[in-house]
Image (cartoon, grey):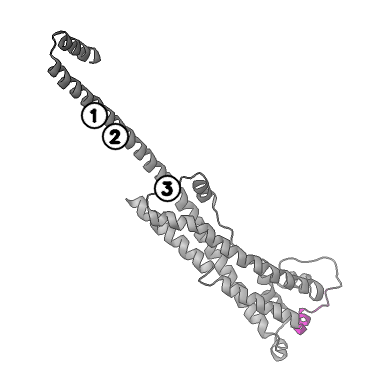
Amino acid sequence: MIKFFRTIRKKMLTENKFSKYLLYAVGEIILVVIGILIALQINNTNNYNEQRSLEQEYLLSLQSEFETNLKKINASIQENELRIQSLEYLLTLFDQNVLDTVNSQIISQKLAPIYGSEISYMPATGVLNDIISSGKLNIILNKSLRQHLASFDSSLNLLNKQIDGAKFTDEKLRAILYEKGSIRKIVMDIGFMDFEYPSISEKLDNKLMFESIEFENYLLGYRLLANATNGPRLFGRIKTEIETILKEIERELEK
C-alpha cells in the first residue's frame, strides 16, 4: 500500500501537477492521522478492558476480605457484650448483702470472660493494603467506594487507641487477681481443667477481692471502656463501614 502511494506521488511530481500532489499529500496525512487515532483508540480500549478486568478481581478479593471482617467484628461485639454483662454483675457484688448470696462457682463464671481474653479486633487487611500501597486504588471507578476503602485504616487506628487504653486497665485487673485472688479457683470452677496435686490457693476465696476499692475502681473503669468500645464510634462504626463497603462492592459487581 505504501509503495502504491509513493508511485502515485512520484508520477504527479514528474508530470508537474503540484496542486493535485498537494491535495494528495493532505489526504495521505489525514489517512495517517486517522490510522494513528484508530490505533490509539484500540489501545485505549484494550487498556480500559484490562483495568475493568483487574477491577473485578480486586472487587471479588475485597468482598471476600470484608465478609471475613464482618464476621470478626460481629464476634468481637458479641464477646465484648458478654464481658460487659459479667462486669455489670460483678460490680453488684461490692454490696456485701449481695455477695453473701453468691457462691464461688458463680463468681468464677463471671470472672472468666474478663480474664479469659482481652478486648480485641484483628481484621484482615492484606488485599486492601496491597491495593493502596501499589497505587491501584484508582482502578476502582466508584468514588464513594474508594473513599470508604481509603478511610477504613483511619477508623482502625482510632479503635486501636481505645484498645490500647483498655489494655492498661486489663493489666491492673490481672495484677489484683494475681495478688489477692486465685486463677486456679476460676479454672476449676468453670471446669476448664482439673488438678491432681494440692495447692495453697485451694482455700483462698475470690470473694476477698470484693473487699478492695482498687478492684472495684478498675472493674468500673473496664466496664466503661468495654461499653464505649461497643458503641457507635468504635466497634459500631467499624461494622457500619464494613457493611457499607460490602453493599457498594455488591452493586459494582452486579453492573
Determine contact: label 2, label 3, CB under 8 Å: no
At label 1, the amino acid type is Ile
Which residues, given as a range, are shown in magenta? Answer: 201-212
37 horizontally vs 128: left or right: left
The location of residue 46, given as percent across then percent down, is: 34, 35
Mark found first going from the N terminus, 2 or 3: 2
Q: Which numbered disc, 3 or 1, marks the residue closer to the eye?
A: 1
SS assignment at label 1: helix
Q: CA distance from mark 3 to mark 1?
A: 31 Å
Residue 124: x percent and y percent?
55, 54
Q: Which residue is under mark 1?
A: 34
Q: Provide the residue designation for mark 2.
A: 41
Residue identified by numbered label 3: 138
Q: Quadrant of the N terminus?
A: top left
Asked whether the beta carbons under mark 3 and mark 1 sit within 8 Å of each other, the answer is no
Q: Nearer the viewer, residue 176 or 86?
A: 176
User: Whole-Å distance between the Cαs marked 2 and 3?
Assistant: 21 Å
Q: Amino acid type of disc 3?
A: Asn
Pick whichever of labels 1 and 2 is earlier in the sequence. Answer: 1
- State left or right for residue 107 relative to residue 28: right
